[in-house]
Amino acid sequence: QVKLVESGGGLVQAGGSLWLSCAASGKIFMINKMGWYRQAPGKQRELVATITSDSHTDYTDSVKGRFTISRDNTKNTVYLQMNSLKPDDTAVYYCYAMGWDEDYRIYDEWGQGTQVTVSS
């Protein structure tokens, strides 16, 4: 079983910065893709950014140029640096990871979520 534990987030004023991190643990053989999604009240969960094992990144348009995703494969950890935050970025942010476990089974896991609140 693979488990994701998130940290970071919190409350910040518009224009400020926050970071998120997410560490994966368990019977991990390989993590193919890690990423962050978010869900604002009354809205569907949406992709924020993803990063593959060879560091290919993808961002939703609304965060391009403001957010940076990175990962440390030695620590099975993904990070999200969020700059120039806007009130519209307020949401619960969820970490995501998919890959293969030590039994070569595909896993697809989510973290518990961490709140990011941006005040105007």
Image (cartoon, rainbow, N blue to C red):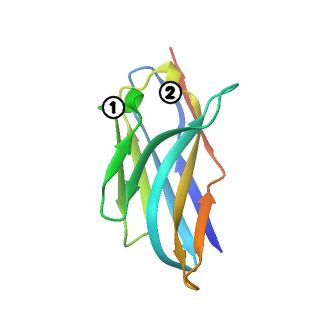
- Residue 63 in percent (x, y) is at 39, 31
Q: Secondary structure at mark 1?
A: loop
Which mark, residue 58? none
Residue under the point 53% across and 63% down: 98
The answer to whether 97 is drawn above or below residue 16 in the figure is: below
Task: Residue under label 2, please give it.
Answer: 89
- Quick one: label 1, few (<14), some, or many (20+) residues within 10 Å? few
The answer to whether 21 is drawn above or below residue 60 in the figure is: below
Q: Taking 112 as reference, is 62 left or right?
A: left
- Residue 19 in percent (x, y) is at 43, 43
The answer to whether 113 is drawn above or below residue 118 in the figure is: below
Q: Secondary structure at mark 2?
A: helix
Which mark, residue 66? 1
Residue type for callout 2: Asp
The picture quadrant where one finds residue 42 is top right
Mark 1 touches mark 2? (CB < 8 Å): no
- Residue 117 in percent (x, y) is at 56, 28
CA separation, marks 1 and 2? 11 Å
- Residue 82 in percent (x, y) is at 39, 36
The picture quadrant where one finds residue 4 is bottom right
Residue under the point 61% across and 37% down: 45
Q: Residue furthest right?
A: 42
Residue type for callout 1: Arg
